[in-house]
Amino acid sequence: MGTISEEIKKRRTFAIISHPDAGKTTLTEKLLLFGGAIQTAGAVKSNKIKNTAASDFMEIEKQRGISVATSVMAFHYRDVLINLLDTPGHKDFAEDTYRTLTAVDSVILVIDCVKGVEEQTEKLMEVCRMRDTPVMIFINKLDREGQNPFDLLDELESKLQIKVRPLSWPISIGATFKGVYNIYDKELNLFNPNKTRIEEEILQIRDLGDSNLEDAIGLKDAGVLRQDIELIEGVYDKFDDGLYRSGHLAPVFFGSAVNNFGIRELLDTFIRLAPAPRPRMADKRLIEPTEEKFSGFVFKIHANIDPRHRDRIAFLRVCSGKFERNKFFHHVRLGKDFKFSSPATFMAQEKNIIEQAFPGDVIGLYDTGNFKIGDTLTEGEKFMFKGIPSFSPEIFKEVANTDPLKSKQLEKGIEQLTEEGLAQLFIQQNGQRKIVGTVGELQFEVIQYRLMHEYGASCKFLPIQIYKACWITFEKPEVFEQFARYRAHQLAQDKDGRYVFLAESPWMLDTMIKDFPDLKFHFNSEFKIA
Ligand code: G4P
């Protein structure tokens, strides 16, 4: 092991994000293949659920258990240690993805060249913009009849609200796809559909006027490529890696993940350009990764839903200093010290107990219920890392107990499952009334299933008309009291005791915002830390 700064320089921690079906799982698998972390294709299990049945979801989760695929895949590529964080494939679990994005230093966004920018892509990009996360774009499935690449670039800029800059360029598309020209390295990468081989045929073309180009791709395509590149160089500024690293410019690559095409180029550029672990804001000050003292935060809690293995793992991103096994660290929220005897990392798909970990690493800590998402561990200093936002859920339902003898179990189950981040909990009437909010219907089924199987409790979810949850802050308590009297039945508290207005319609929300100018209405919970 080197010094902390040497270890930091070696690391790249990122996530792949995409609209379902664009190719996230395939790209993940190919990156692992290129990194030598797996030997054969098919080793990475998709975590998407083709139809939205809770039973399918449960089955997949059981098989996965607390496994590599649910959290982080670490592998070496050249002299870099890559930590690839996994994000759920199902849109109903988008909130989980948003939280994972707080633990990465950059992302690779996969776009299907036939479908272009899709709904989920836009939402994910919004989260990246909130913290200026650097984004690299991989346009996938070039072996299909996709859209014109110039149109795709325009669509990326307008829908994702980020400047883009192609660093590679496709030669034809679909059935006549011939390969890509790497603008950055001035190389021609010839396409040879092949799902198993990982070598690519690469020709160095230092000058596009070179007649080798015609020999390789034919007269017509050579002409089009020269024109396209001239246009690109005319329209787009020279690639500025500083702008990329500050989250304002996204380099774009083209390829076909299933055919192993364009992956090496993406990976090589990624390790060169993507940022190493970056400083992070805490409530009191900025924490530099190079600081000697350890700090980190929990961004995900995973419970094994197999009742035979009832364990829970808190995933912690190391932000500064060095984490060490069996050393006492300070749990800031609880004000208590804890040590961890079997912290795990996930190298080359194997879970290993580690002795130490460095900034950028993600470690799994066995947890008996001490951790909540957002918790900070330090070497004693009292600060909390910022920026684990909750957004307003889309669907709200009231919890109704259907087994009065098991009310304690139900209470505990709802509390723990929402702590895991499966859904958001809003309470009214001192906890007598509980409202659960989620992004999709699937989560309600999952909660019901898990309450039954893990806590022996059963409940019904009653639909209620709520349009949006808004967090409320105020400077004048008397104004809030007036609001609370007037809107008592729509006021709730979240899991941290913060006030939330559950507006039943856009009209009602607008009216309240107008009628109570002294109250602040926030559309995500990050205000506390922003
Ligand atoms: P996701 O994780 O983003 O949801 O997508 P995933 O990788 O599972 O890919 C979705 C589908 O797209 C898969 O097909 C996959 O094989 C296919 N795919 C990925 N990359 C490419 C590509 O470069 N070209 C083409 N033509 N297809 C690609 P599927 O039929 O849903 O699954 P499978 O039966 O192939 O596993």
Image: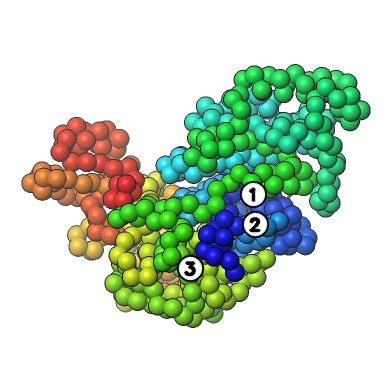
Q: Position of residue 32 (x, y in %)?
A: 70, 57
Q: Position of residue 214 (x, y in %)?
A: 89, 25
Question: From what the image shows, is residue 126 above or below residue 355?
Answer: above
Q: Is residue 424 visible?
A: no
Q: Earlier in the sequence, mark 3 or mark 1?
A: 1
Q: Earlier in the sequence, mark 2 or mark 3?
A: 2
Q: CA distance from mark 2 to mark 3?
A: 18 Å
| Residue 378 quadrant | bottom left
Q: Mark 3 is on which residue type?
A: Lys
Question: From what the image shows, is residue 353 above or below residue 53?
Answer: below
Q: Mark 1 is on which residue type?
A: Ile
- Whether residues under marks 3 and 1 lie with C-beta atoms below 8 angstroms apart, the answer is no
Could you say whether the residue bearing mark 3 is in a helix, strand or loop? loop
Which residue is depicted at the point 44% across and 52% down? 279
Residue, disc 3? 322
Which of the pair 250/488 is nearer the observer? 250
Taking the image as shown, residue 14 lies to the left or right of residue 378, namely: right
Taking the image as shown, residue 38 lies to the left or right of residue 361, namely: right
Q: Position of residue 274 (x, y in %)?
A: 58, 46
Q: Mark 2 is on which residue type?
A: Val
Residue, disc 1? 271
Q: Earlier in the sequence, mark 1 or mark 2?
A: 2
- Whether residues under marks 1 and 2 lie with C-beta atoms below 8 angstroms apart, the answer is yes
Question: From what the image shows, is residue 278 above or below residue 453?
Answer: above
Q: CA distance from mark 3 to mark 1?
A: 23 Å
Residue, disc 2? 80
Which of the pair 155/92 is nearer the observer? 155
Could you say whether the residue bearing mark 2 is in a helix, strand or loop? strand
